[in-house]
Amino acid sequence: MRKLKTLLSGLLALVLVLAFVPSFGMAAEAETRTALTPGDYEVEVDAHGPGMVVKVTLSEDKIEAIEIVSHDETPGVSDAALETVPARIVEANSLSVDLMTGATITSEGIVAAVAKAIEEAGGNPDEFRATEDPEEPEEPAEVRPNLSGLPVPETFDFEYDIVVIGGGFAGLAAAEHAASLGASTVLIEKMPVLGGNSQINGGVYAAYTSQIADELYEKLNLEPDTAEKHIEDTIVGGDYMGDPALVKNLVYGSPMYLDKLIDAGLELRESITRPGGHYGYRTYTTINGIGGDITRVQKEMLDETDAEVLLNTKMTAIYREADGEGRVVGIRVTDADGEEKNIRAEKGVILCSGGFSGNVEMRLKHVPTLTEDVPTTNHVGATGEGLTMAQEIGANTMQMSYIQLYPFANPNNGVLDATAVIPFSGPSAGVVYVDYKGERYVNEGERRDVCSLAAQQSGGFPTFCILGQQIVDEGGFITEEQLENGMEADRIFKADTLEALAEEINARTYKDGSVTIDPATLAETIATHNTYVANGEDPDFGKRIDSGVMMPIEDGPYYAIPQWPSVHHTMGGLTITNRTEVQDIWNEVIPGLYAAGEVTGGVHGTNRLGSNATPDALVHGYIAAEVAVTGEMPDFVPAD
Ligand code: ADP
């Protein structure tokens, strides 16, 4: 029993010794200290109270014992220090010990007494104090968990250099360029056809110049644009939330890709417009006013390469290695027969899977007002799962709540048809938007977010775009065929007078409702606007009026197009570098994973300017291919 007690007290002492290890670096080594004259030294110091007498027993190199002989410290407060600090000094054979919180002055008095005794013994107290530890603290170990998802399969069913997911603008551009650089390439598309959402967009393309720009600017009497203005409008139009590096890619790459498309046979209308939010004339419109004009040319370009296309094939997971650099090495798909297959990507997986406007649950997570009652302009494939799969292997997202409504969609079904492009392209030519009372409600030259909100707050449903025959004839952005088709589909109403146009508007139903515009009001609104065009100033809404470009609505026939906001573009998405490399939640590049087009975030900021989506997707698809295949950025973006 006694032995056990001894053992226990020994263990206790050991624990105490460990606990009393000085908290600073190590005291000087014993052999480097000045030898002390051994003996008992009784010294007096002032602590909290005056005259604390301390007896210090010293050997040649050690503080052997400390006894507080007398003191005048505050009872209670100083008790712990009087007991503990001497023990700590003796245990550590050092003056650098943890002092007692709450009794610091008493503790410091004891240390000072021992230092004084050491001095009296012929020693140097500093040699009993801790020195700075010269060694650098060790780097903390890597604590990040790996971000791999499913285990990487041991064998793959197919192997390519480049695997592109999505057959819209971005995916077609990426696949075409990768293949033309000599990489074995496959494009995976879940739908039965290529084209994605891109083929049903408005066929509008913003470029500050092009191979046909000089000729058109001169013919249309327009002031030429610059890259700097395009960059500025894009950044300002997104409330400075767009990444300038990505905006520069879009702007500087845009003429390059437009020229490439023109060389490959893309047909454009004879117009360059200045839609809402753009302050330079830079928007081209394809011959039929739909994105399908562009994707058709892209498909032809792709056909010229060796790239393979797998339709009805859906990506269901991304494979990322758990070790090494955590590289993305391929994807899992469900093929056209419903079978699961694994595809290896030797050089890179390029995600071009588009946005999530068509996924109500996903958009509700970010913008709770975008319920299923709010229609979308998007195709059924715009469901955003590519984005989610990238998140599952650690990819970061940004600006997910920036979701754009297209202000001029068909109010009955939310669709962006060729007719719905007219109100978008028309502001610089002089179209006027009116509300359910026949009155203007917004500056027609404003950004999409401003126009959408103004419509929603106009007090009625829907709103209307009004134009006259002169705009049709001279604006260059509406074809005769388009007008005829629009009227046949009852999307465009025509009348010989503005009063009769109001009656045409009032005769239709919009969803289940109707409007009652006073014919005289509509005529007055347009007459007033005509005076603004003539004077070059819009005192009501401050619209910019370029003389000689904006036209009055004077002679009939007149046309009206009903319009209403519809979910159109998800500006947020995967976080990428300017080289289109997808970044993880710690901003590290995920090796082997690239993204381009609407699946990415950060290009447009809060609000995308109309006609910027097309060059965004095409140029970034092109960059992704170039970087994935060659490791180098294309050189069209000038260095700062
Ligand atoms: P972008 O304009 O960015 O190119 P689009 O919406 O036009 O985007 O095209 C994206 C394409 O990606 C669509 O054709 C869509 O069907 C396709 N896609 C989306 N998710 C998947 C998936 N999981 N697997 C294969 N294709 C997908």
Image (spheres, rainbow, N blue to C red):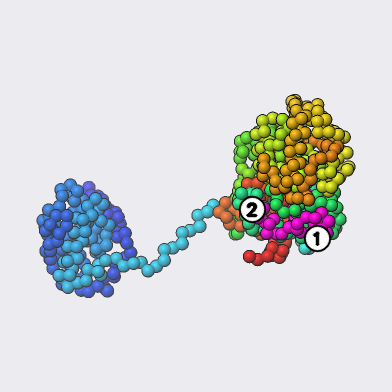
Is 217 above or below relative to 521? below
* Left or right of 483 in this view: 537: left
Tag 1–tag 2 contact (CB < 8 Å): no
**Measured Cα–Cα span from mark 1 to mark 2:** 25 Å
Cβ at disc 2 under 8 Å from ligand 1: no
Q: Residues within 10 Å of mark 1 (few under 14, many from 20)?
A: few
Magenta-highlighted residues: 204-233
Q: Residue 302 in magenta?
A: no
Dot 1 amino acid type: Asp
Who comes first in sequence, dot 1 or dot 2? 1
Q: Specify the quadrant of the image occupied by residue 326.
A: bottom right
* Left or right of 127 in this view: 618: right
Identified at 50% across, 57% down, the residue is 142
Secondary-structure class at tag 1: helix
Residue 307 in view here:
no
Quadrant in which the C terminus appears: bottom right
Identified at 17% across, 62% down, the residue is 113
* Left or right of 368 in this view: 78: left
Which mark, residue 235?
A: 2
Which of the pair 74/314 is nearer the observer? 74
Closer to viewer: mark 1 or mark 2: 1
Is 7 above or below relative to 443? below
Residue 476 in view here:
yes
Residue 626 position, x and y percent, is 72, 61
Secondary-structure class at tag 2: helix
Residue 180 position, x and y percent, is 80, 61
Residue 299 position, x and y percent, is 83, 52
